[in-house]
Every structure is written in structure tokens, then in C-alpha cells.
Image (cartoon, helix red, strand yellow):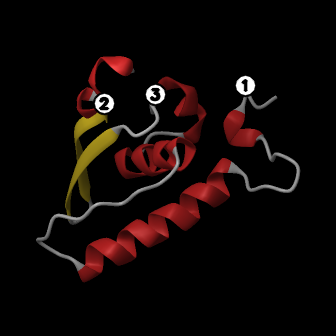
């Protein structure tokens, strides 16, 4: 079920993607409010990153598998009030040819 419908799945003992997204976006909003106009770095697991990116873009969680997040990748997002722009997605150039 996780592969076919991740947005509707609760893994045993875990959160749904909706719960992960709500928790992660609340943290992003708090960080952004405390650092307006600044550049900040947020580090998270790939699955959490996907929920953040989808939420900021207003894309349904059912699109979870359409975003790739390699280990140690970099995403750059510009926040301007309610508007979010994904400037860089899943960049791994800093890892060299090993990816």
C-alpha cells in the first residue's frame, strides 16, 4: 500500500504523510518567521523533505513518488510570504561523481 498510495498509508507505529507534513511545515513556518530576510539551512530526511516541498508548492501528497531526494542532496527554496519558489531541487553536484 505504501508504494501505491503513500498519502493514505500509516506505517505501523508511525505517522501518516499528512501528519509528517503538518509537523514539518509548522517548523518551517516558525524558522522562517524568526529569520525573515536571512538565508537558513534546514536538514531533514528525504521523505520529510518531500512533504515540505509538496506542501510549499500546494501539490497533493499523492505526488510523493514524483519527487526524488538523493542522500545529502540540496534543495533551495525561496519564501516570500505565502509564495514559495523551488529554485534548486535534488542537487548532488557537491558529492562528485559518486552519486
Answer with mark 3 or mark 2, whichever residue precedes in sequence: 3
Residue 80 versus residue 96 in the image, above or below: below
Disc 1: which residue: 3
**x and y percent of residue 53 in the render?**
40, 45
Corner quadrant of residue 7 = top right
**Which residue is under mark 3?**
68
Q: Secondary structure at mark 3?
A: loop
Badge 2: residue crowd in 10 Å (few <14, some 14–19, many ≥20): few
Residue at the location (37% across, 51% down)?
56
Report the front residue among 65 and 93: 93
* Residue at mark 2: 95
Q: CA distance from mark 3 to mark 1?
A: 14 Å
For disc 1, the neighbor class at 10 Å (few under 14, some 14 to 19, many from 20) is few
Labels 2 & 1 near each other (Cβ < 8 A): no
> Which quarter of the image is occupied by the N terminus?
top right
The residue lying at 37 percent from left, 71 percent from top is 29
Q: Secondary structure at mark 2?
A: helix
Q: Residue at x 47, y 70 (%)?
A: 26
Q: Residue furthest left?
A: 37
| Residue 71 left/right relative to 5 | left
Look at the numbered disc 1 and give the secondary structure of its residue: loop
**54 left or right of 81?**
right
In the current view of this chain or complex, which residue is farthest to the top?
97
Contact (Cβ within 8 Å) of mark 3 with mark 1: no
Left or right: 87 with respect to 49? Answer: left
Amino acid at each position: 500500500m505504501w508504494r501505491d498510495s503513500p498519502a493514505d498509508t500509516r506505517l505501523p507505529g508511525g505517522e501518516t504523510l499528512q501528519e509528517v507534513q503538518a509537523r514539518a511545515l509548522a517548523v518551517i513556518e516558525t524558522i522562517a518567521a524568526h529569520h525573515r530576510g536571512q538565508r537558513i539551512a534546514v536538514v531533514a530526511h528525504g521523505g520529510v523533505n518531500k512533504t515540505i516541498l509538496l506542501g510549499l508548492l500546494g501539490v497533493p501528497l499523492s505526488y510523493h513518488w514524483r519527487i526524488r531526494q538523493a542522500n545529502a542532496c540540496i534543495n533551495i527554496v525561496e519564501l516570500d510570504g505565502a509564495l514559495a519558489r523551488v529554485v534548486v531541487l535534488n542537487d548532488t553536484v557537491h558529492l562528485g561523481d559518486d552519486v
